[in-house]
């Protein structure tokens, strides 16, 4: 469980996150909102790349903000970025091994654990292939494999389906859905594809201009008038 | 405004346990970690055998000394290529680190009379420490700014070295005596007293350096460097200790420059301070880019270009200064048409040529049949 209390981030005169208080239970939680709402900034706070001016984040009983940036991954925060970050000139296996060996994966089963993560996302047959030779959907799956390897506690997925065709998004959704149950990590999903959010998330939090305007069960939030006005629009609800 | 979250009572609360799609769940064995393929091993062994045993028989002393220089410069290019190609850090002080390696090796020799292998190893290690100190700004700088800082460091160190001169058995910290002349030279080990033996000795040291480089590239350090080169932010998000691995890269490149300096100090003719002008760091960078920084073979191509081209020009009666212009044109051409360098492009071009030749051979009989 992740408890965010009074979180405020300020960059000069801009306040990308303003007094955000929300509790994200174990499972997959969607974080939606229009561009510039503060979703990626929230991820940057959780992964240590942005420092809030106020607020607390308690994740699995630990004060997350007190953990130095370079220790967050080892603690269990994993994230993907809006732009693809799988390393093209490394194999799929080495991409995942890179994360595992730098987050505490040093045991004798290290290579098998990496292979398990590669298999989890359905890329076992491509383990030795260079990422540059894969399609866009497979490259996104490599990023998910990098996020699930080892013992992550909190996985932050930033628009993982961006640019993917429907069938690849659907497959990505099935992989994301399995993470809490099989990997044991909580997932926060920033996504504009509402079908993916609906398929994967038990709850949704909605940000608008840095303010949390709604949060709760997916079905309830998607019917919330403030959410429809701020983000979804009338046609989406119809 | 603060909005407290509502309790989750989703109808999809247990969706995460939903039946997965067709994702393979059988445990798959991890791929084997192999440093080198058998074909590569055979090619490398054949090249080494040619260089060590056939080449000394084919060339005279002048070209043998050039070949020895090529091997030594290959070691420095290897370090610089790793730094640029693997980590994405541009250093313009490798040439002065080369000189520092020679200086430290000579100083250690006159101070302790240790055998050459130990002197060369220690020269590499001391140069690595100095390289790390120069590389400290790399923790915050990159690109043009890092290149500028390292170039200025190279300029400063060259001034210091010009003041100290190379040790030649004198007293004090510098170990230089005016009576000892401007050139200093390390004694060679008894196993490699002759020029041919020393050429082979340098090849063996270079092979060790290449193995160290190849092991790094395939190991945890290589993966961390690849992550840093891709994006430092995502490397941090992946848990990579970017500070440690960037400094390690500087240390390794400097170590190789130091080892190269130690080897050069024992080469025929020894070393003098005039051999190490600051601008050579820039030329070194251009040539290593021509050779290619994406694979370790680029260092071999770079070493050959850097030392062989001026000698060939000299042999043909053309001023060696033209080599700088040729390197400039060459690096421009390579960056425009083959960003991976000659070592990356040549195999592709040879493969293309092979396909064309095969096409001609296959087409000719068919064409002959048609004509009949």
Image (cartoon, coloured by chain):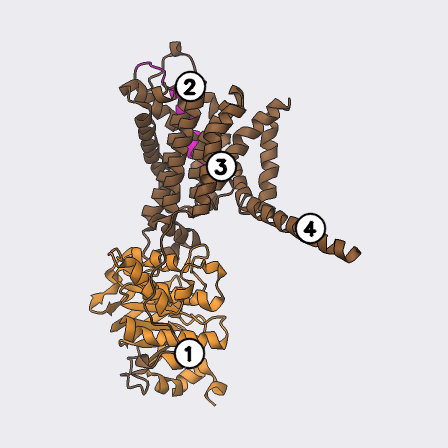
- Position of the C terminus of chain B, as image quadrant, is bottom right
Label 3 lies in what chain? B
Q: Residue at x 69, y 50 (%)?
A: B360
Q: Which residue in the structure is indicated by mark 4?
A: B360
Relative placement, left or right, of B105 versus B312 is left
Task: Identify the hue of chain B.
Answer: brown
Q: Which residue in the structure is indicated by mark 2?
A: B194
Is residue A45 at all visible to an observer of this figure? no
Determine whether the residue tagged by mark 1 lies in a helix, strand or loop: helix
How many C-alpha atoms fall within 10 Å of the one at disc 1: few (<14), some, or many (≥20)? many
Most common SS among magenta residues:
helix
Q: Are marks 2 and 1 in contact (CB under 8 Å)?
A: no
Where B4 falls versus B346 (above or below)? below
- Give the spatial CA distance, label 4 vs label 2: 49 Å
Task: Identify the hue of chain A.
Answer: orange
Q: Nearer the viewer, residue A54 or B189?
A: B189
| Mark sitting on residue A196 | 1
Q: Are marks 4 and 3 in contact (CB under 8 Å)?
A: no
In the rendered image, residues at marks 3 and 1 fall on the same chain: no
Q: What's drawn in magenta, residue-wise? A: B151-171
In this view, the mark in front (4 or 1): 4
Label 4 lies in what chain? B
Is residue B44 at all visible to an observer of this figure? yes
- Give the spatial CA distance, label 2 vs label 1: 73 Å
- Give the spatial CA distance, label 4 vs label 1: 54 Å
- Position of the N terminus of chain B, as image quadrant, is bottom left
| Mark sitting on residue B300 | 3
How many C-alpha atoms fall within 10 Å of the one at disc 3: few (<14), some, or many (≥20)? many
- Give the spatial CA distance, label 3 vs label 2: 24 Å
């Amino acid at each position: 469980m992740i408890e965010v209390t009074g979180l405020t981030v300020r960059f000069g005169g801009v306040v990308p996150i303003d007094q955000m208080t929300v509790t994200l239970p174990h499972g997959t939680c969607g974080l939606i909102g229009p561009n510039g709402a503060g979703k990626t900034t929230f991820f940057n706070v959780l992964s240590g790349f942005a420092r809030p001016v106020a607020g607390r984040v308690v994740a699995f009983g630990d004060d997350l903000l007190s953990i130095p940036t370079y220790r967050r991954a080892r603690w269990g925060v994993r994230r993907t970025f809006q732009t693809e970050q799988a390393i093209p000139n490394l194999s799929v296996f080495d991409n995942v091994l890179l994360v595992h060996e730098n987050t505490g994966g040093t045991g004798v089963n290290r290579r098998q654990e990496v292979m398990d993560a590669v298999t989890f996302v359905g890329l076992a047959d491509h383990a030795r292939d260079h990422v540059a030779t894969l399609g866009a959907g497979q490259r996104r799956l490599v990023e998910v494999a990098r996020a699930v390897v080892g013992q992550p506690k909190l996985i932050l997925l930033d628009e993982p389906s961006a640019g993917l065709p429907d069938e690849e998004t659907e497959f990505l959704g099935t992989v994301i859905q399995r993470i809490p149950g099989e990997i044991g990590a909580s997932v926060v999903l920033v996504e504009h594809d509402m079908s993916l959010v609906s398929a994967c998330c038990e709850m949704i939090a909605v940000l608008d201009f840095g303010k949390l305007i709604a949060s709760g069960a997916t079905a309830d939030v998607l019917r919330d008038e403030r959410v429809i006005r701020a983000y979804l629009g009338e046609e989406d609800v119809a | 405004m603060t909005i407290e979250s509502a309790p989750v009572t989703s109808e999809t609360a247990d969706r995460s346990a939903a039946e997965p799609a067709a994702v393979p769940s059988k445990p798959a064995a991890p791929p084997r970690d192999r440093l080198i393929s058998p074909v590569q091993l055979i090619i490398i062994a054949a090249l080494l055998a040619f260089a060590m045993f056939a080449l000394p028989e084919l060339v005279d002393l002048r070209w043998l000394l050039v070949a020895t220089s090529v091997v030594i410069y290959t070691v420095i290019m290897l370090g610089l290529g790793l730094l640029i190609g693997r980590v994405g850090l541009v250093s313009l002080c490798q040439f002065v680190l080369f000189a520092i390696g020679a200086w430290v090796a000579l100083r250690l020799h006159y101070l302790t009379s240790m055998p050459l292998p130990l002197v060369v190893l220690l020269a590499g290690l001391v140069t690595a420490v100095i390289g790390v100190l120069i590389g400290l700004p790399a923790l915050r700088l990159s690109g043009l700014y890092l290149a500028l800082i390292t170039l200025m460091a190279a300029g400063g160190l060259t001034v210091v070295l010009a003041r100290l001169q190379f040790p030649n058995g004198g007293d004090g910290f510098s170990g230089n005596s005016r009576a000892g002349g401007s050139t200093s030279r390390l004694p060679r080990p008894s196993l490699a007293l002759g020029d041919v033996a020393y050429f082979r000795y340098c090849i063996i040291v270079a092979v060790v350096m290449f193995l160290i480089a190849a092991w790094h590239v395939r190991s945890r350090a290589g993966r961390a460097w690849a992550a840093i080169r891709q994006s430092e932010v995502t490397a941090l998000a992946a848990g990579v200790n970017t500070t440690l691995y960037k400094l390690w890269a500087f240390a390794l490149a400097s170590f190789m420059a130091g080892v190269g300096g130690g080897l050069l100090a024992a080469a025929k003719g020894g070393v003098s301070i005039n051999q190490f002008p600051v601008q050579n760091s820039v030329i070194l960078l251009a040539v290593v880019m021509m050779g290619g920084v994406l694979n370790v073979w680029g260092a071999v191509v770079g070493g050959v270009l850097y030392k062989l081209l001026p000698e060939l020009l000299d042999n043909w009666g053309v001023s060696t200064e033209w080599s700088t212009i040729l390197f400039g044109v060459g690096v421009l051409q390579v960056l425009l048409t083959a960003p991976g360098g000659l070592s990356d492009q040549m195999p592709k071009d040879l493969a293309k040529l092979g396909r064309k030749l095969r096409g001609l051979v296959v087409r000719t009989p068919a064409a002959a049949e048609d004509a009949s």
